[in-house]
Image: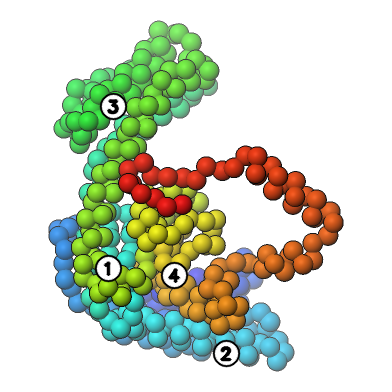
Amino acid sequence: EMCIRDRYKVYAGQEVRLTMGCGEGIQDCANPGVLRAEFCEVPEDRAPSLVDQTLKVQDAKVDMHLSSTIFEPMEGRLAGLNANFHFHYESLVKAEFDKIKAGTGYPIILSIGSRVILHHNGKRYMNSVDLKTYHALKAIDHIILGVYIALLGCASGTVSDDKIRETAASIDDLSENLVEEGIPENAVAGCRHVLAVAKQLCANRLEHLCTSRETMSKELMSLRDAIEQHIVIAQAAVLSGLHEIHAMYEALMSEEERESYYVAVAVAHQARSGDISKSYFLAMLNEQEGPGASQEHRVLAGEGVWDEHGLLDMVVRHCIDRSVGVAFFGDARRMQKAVSYTHLRAHETPEHLVCRLLLEKKKKNNPEIPYTLRTLTTLRV
């Protein structure tokens, strides 16, 4: 059982019984809605070649018996009508899932870690981006960060000298075997520089030299160019693999489908701005990144959504909400906003006006620099 509000989710191979509420005192529904869905997912260890597989999705059985006590308001004439809305909304979601299953819906590309999945014409394709270079370079930069944190811990006695010696020996061994560990030739020199600084910091500590935060910072700042180079090389490797798969998937689509498919990218909770996969698809589909979901159209970010079916569910609801926004407000993005900015302006007090103008003046004097990917030849922002 799980507690949710205003939204149902379909999980692979699980029966989801819905209860509504937050925190303690949750009341179970007398006749909870039951969503069943069984999806056949391609294992991650499957060879990353393009595979043409029938989308093996059994009919999703939706048996919705929603009590009026599930939703606020729980009493009065509004209760039953509100429950009726949720029933019809979920029925519409199911209908859109059925279209994907039958191959009559819009194509959807999902990017989940190394996996890139396409749902198209009732079939499911899966390929994987080789992230070995990305993870290897990331691990190198984690080494210097780990040494820095460990040396800060030495001041409080939480890290022993023996541990520092062990770390220094491991760094020395790694420095001579970088290529074997997956480091590309064009990054070896930079990696050895990073490791040399890490080893020197360890030596300073063992010789009881100063390892204060300020002293170490001077050494760390000398690594900025090397670390930036690692980022560029890692991004280039990811983008190369991602672009190859994306090109194969677009080749399967008609010209009309290439102008209308959707992309959902799984990103971490409170992800950094400029997620590599999301930025790639934004560039390819000529879209802009905005705060939250304010600018999302065909490229969506699923924050903390790492399962395939959760991303599909997100895309389906996004498309439904866009059609609702057009029907009610003439604005496809209206349902992606919590409140109307124009409406707030209409009720703006003189005090609010002064604050807003001062903030706008400050922003004009300090414009934000848009994020770009160096490894993309063109990124429209």
Q: Residue 106's image quarter?
A: bottom left
Q: Nearer the viewer, mark 2 or mark 1?
A: 1
Give left or right: position of 125 versus 204: left
Classed neighbour count for the residue bearing mark 3: other residues with Cα under 10 Å, few (<14), some (14–19), many (≥20): many
Quickly name the residue at label 4. Answer: 314
Which element type, helix, strand or loop, lies under badge 1? strand
Q: Nearer the viewer, mark 2 or mark 3?
A: 3
Image spot of residue 204 (x, y percent): 40, 11
Amino acid type, residue under disc 4 in the picture: Met
Quickly name the residue at label 1. Answer: 118
Specify which label sits upstream in the sequence, 1 or 3.
1
In this rendering, does residue 32 appear at all? no
- Residue at image point 42% right, 75% down: 316
Q: Which mark is residue 191?
A: 3
Q: Which mark is residue 84?
A: 2
Cα–Cα gap, marks 2 and 3: 61 Å
